[in-house]
Structure formats: structure tokens, C-alpha cells
Amino acid sequence: MSTTPASAKTTAVKTKIDFAGEEIPLHDVLVKKRFIATLRQTKLSLREVGDAKARAKRWFKIIEPILAKNGIPQDFKYIPVIESGYEFGTDVSSKGAAGFWQFMPATARSYGLAVGNGVDERYDPIKSTNAACRYLKDLYREFGSWTMVAAAYNIGSTKLQRHTKQQKEDDYFKLNLNRETSVYVYKLIAVKTAINRTPVNAFSQETPKVVTAGYSINLSNLYTYSPEFVTNILKRFGYSSLKSVERKAVK
């Protein structure tokens, strides 16, 4: 937010963003840059968001209680959303990972899922989620951090351990990892935001603005981070919602 009057006072707004209760250190310049870049690159259309929300509403009813029963943070329910290509279990990777949690055959079997002889329990939402919980618990015992657990889920525990030993670092946000894993947690947050917030395309090139009494407020991305703050600002200028700003812009 920029103000024209020299006497105008600006107030810093601190917004806590976390994954599984672990705060994202946005005070770190590199982390903030990577986080914002990931949000912008995760360009879900309104239709994709709508489809994802519809599927999530159905499958989260099954996944959420199982995660809660096993003491796994609810943010992990977004792993099936991005791992299975927003299709909740219909996608199969080129390497053979499949099902809701995109288990490889060997990993699936090691956690009690039947794979083979015409049976593939990776596609069973209840059994595969219970297996995923056991796997996530093992990863947490190994790494002691939920963000590291998410990274290990993506890259594999062996590779992540190798990185921690070579770099002598066990903080996900300070590790130098491959491109996909280095933004994995940020992508989970982006999808979480897209599914749970009002479907406003915060990444479009046409950015809604309010221009009144010398004030210019850029709403791009800010609404995604803090909808309450944006709503309160809009009310000061006579707007009831972000949609009312967009309607006026169209006129």
C-alpha cells in the first residue's frame, strides 16, 4: 500500500503463515521471494479451483478424521491434491506411483497395502490414508519437523537425510534442495489457500485497485495473505467487498 500525502502514516501488517503449525519465516528475504514466486506460479483457474474444492469436499470427509485420529496435522490432507494431479487418486506417475497418496508399489506394501494380482489398495481412500499416516509418523520420528516431513514425502527420506548430512543443516527453509522439493511446502500452502479462500484470481494481470483521496492500494496477493485486512481497508473507502471493487472497475 502506498500513500501520496507526506503526512500519511503507514502501518506494517504482520501476517503469520504456517504449515502444520510451523511458521514460514517470511522475514528471510530468500524464503519470502521463493514463497511469493510459488504462489504466482501455482496458477489455478477459477474452474480448477472449483473442481478441486468439489473433490476436496467429498474426500476430506474421509481423510480428515483419519489424520486427526493419528495425530497428523490437517495440512497434510493437501498432499493428495497435488500429488495425484488434483484428481484425488486417478493419476499414475511415470515412475509407477499411484493412488490418493501416490505411493510407489514397494512403499505401499511396506505399509500394509496390497498391490498386485489384480488388487491395488493405493486407490482405497481409507486404507491408503491410514498407511500414509503410518508413513508420516515414521518420517516425523526421523526428522522431528513437519515441514521436513513434507519435504521427505516428496524427495524421499534417504535423499533428504543425505542433504542434511552433506549440508549440516536440518531446517527445510535453509536447505539447498532440488527445485520441486524446495517449493513443495509453499505449493501445499498455495493449494490450501486456493481451496479454502473465496475463489478470487489473485494472480491475474488485471489487479483491482482503489484510488481515493491520494491513496493507491494494490490488492494483488494481499487478499490471499490477509482477506480480513483487505476487507477492512475496502470498507474505509466505501466498498463492501473485493467483488464490489471489481464491478466498479468493469464499469
Image (cartoon, rainbow, N blue to C red):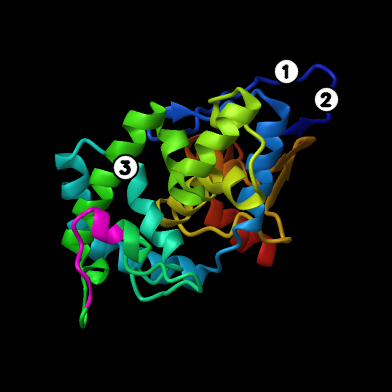
Q: Amino acid at mark 3?
A: Leu
Which residue is found at the position 61% from the left and 39% from the top? 237
| Residue 84, horizontal then vertical, whole percent | 41, 66
Closer to the camera, 58 or 228? 58
Amino acid bearing label 1 = Lys
Q: Nearer the viewer, mark 3 or mark 1?
A: 3
**CA separation, marks 3 and 1?**
47 Å
Asked if residue 8 shows in the view, the reply is: yes
For the question of whether residue 235 can be seen, the reply is no
Specify which label sits upstream in the sequence, 3 or 1: 1
Q: Quadrant of the C terminus?
A: bottom right
Dot 3 corresponds to which residue? 136
Secondary structure of the residue carrying tag 1 is loop
Q: Is residue 109 left or right of residue 168?
A: left
Neighbours of disc 1 within 10 Å: few (<14), some (14-19), many (20+): few
Say which amino acid is labelled 2: Pro
Q: Is residue 52 magenta?
A: no
> Residue beneath label 1, please?
9
Spatial separation of the CA atoms under disc 2 and disc 3:
53 Å
Q: Which residue is mark 2?
A: 5
- Which residues lie in the magenta part? 108-116
User: Comparing marks 2 and 1, which lies closer to the viewer?
Assistant: 1
Q: Is residue 122 above or below residue 168?
A: below
Residue 156 spot, x, y in % from top left: 47, 47
Q: Residues within 10 Å of mark 3 (few under 14, many from 20)?
A: many
Total number of numbered labels? 3
